[in-house]
Amino acid sequence: MDKMERLSNTVKDLAVGGSAVAVGIATTKTLEGGPPSTDLNCFLPEARSAVVFALPLDQGAIEAFLKKEDMAAGNVDNRRTNTMASGIALEMAEYLNMKGYESVPITANAVYRKDVPGGAYAEIPPISHRYLAVRSGVGHFGISGNIIMDKYGAGTILASVLTQAELIPTDPLPREDNYCDECGLCRAACASGLMSGDEKTTVTLGGIEFSYAKRLSYSRCDFVCGGFSGLHKSGNWSTWSPARFPIPEKDEEFLPALLGAVEPFRNRIKPDFGCNIYHPLVPGNRLEFTCGHCQFICHPDKKVRQDRYKMLTTSGVAIQEADGYVKAVHPDEAREHLDKLDPETRALYE
């Protein structure tokens, strides 16, 4: 076993020892031909390899979140899993630096390039964990564009490390092993309509093609997953956001809708979970994790997917009480609750 093979095995062991459930290695060669977010040298000059790994989310917290039984558990688990993934990336990068190979960690979320049109608000990651993961065999693409795995579905958090070490790449998973049957429940669970129903995005990484549903404007996800609004067009269910500002149909309508919802978002009471999420692009910096349905619905067992979709669509509508507590009620009760509010308070929600 040569030096780079030993080092490759060591960094994989380091990730697994930190609770990662899958680890892969991509190189400049295996990523060749990919989009700018796969250019390792853009973020680390002379980078040769990237290590990417996945940590699992709590499946119990996912189902309690979808049923609207427990908002806090999903938020706390999400924050802690992201923090753990980012911490492993930092630990791995420093290990490689100490070994003499310049390396940088790419944290799990909420880091964006500033050197592009729109700056950080364009929400372009320095490096795409998803592309690294699918090329290196951490998981497959689901139709949602999320990375899916045989045991955990889409319920994982990814982080990466770029390094000048010439590590040994790992192979992508066999295409025939991908459990995604394009059932569409991830799309149906997205109140914002982020995923196209008929167009796909295809990327070529090191001569291999990977596809998933084309994503429309990310302002859609900002508006709904960001908690600015959340009532599904049916009126029968919502995200955990108690706001119900109209969710537009067209991409170009989302940014104005989002800007119009900024002050109500800023002025609503934010639940305190004791492990709160902070995001640099969110008004007031405090973020409530209210959605993630496309990720949470997906499970290797189709029956579980169907059950989870039913959990969501029968979970009711979120409202916020005077003390800031958010709970789910029947749509008719939500309407009565809002109608009783004074006009100034009601304007925070619709």
Image (cartoon, rainbow, N blue to C red):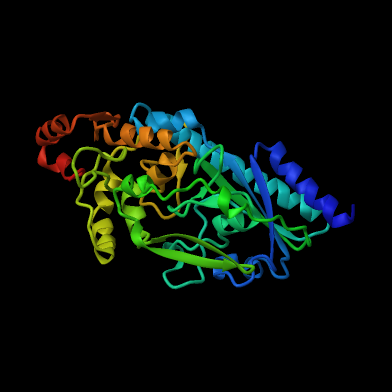
Q: Quadrant of residue 207?
A: bottom right
The answer to which of 91 and 48 lies nearer the viewer is 48
Observer able to see residue 272: no
Q: Measuring from the top left, give residue 166's x and y in whole percent.
A: 78, 62
**Which residue occupies 60% across, 44% down?**
54
Q: Residue furthest front?
A: 176
Q: Which percent across, then down, holds residue 332?
A: 13, 32
Q: Is residue 277 left or right of residue 94?
A: left
Residue 287 lies, with reference to residue 281, above or below; the image says above
Q: Is 168 placed left or right of 187 in the picture?
A: right
Q: Position of residue 273 (x, y in %)?
A: 42, 31
Q: Position of residue 79 (x, y in %)?
A: 50, 39
Residue at (45% x, 67% y) in the render: 119
* Residue closer to the observer: 326 or 189: 189
Q: Residue at x 23, y 53 (%)?
A: 247
Q: Taking the image as drawn, is residue 342 in sight?
A: yes
Tag count: 0
Residue in the picture at 37% in, 32% down: 307
Please state if 255 lies on the left or on the right of 35 as rendered. left
- Asked whether 305 or 102 is in front, the reply is 305
Left or right, 197 with reference to 21: left
- Locate residue 321: give its quadrant: top left
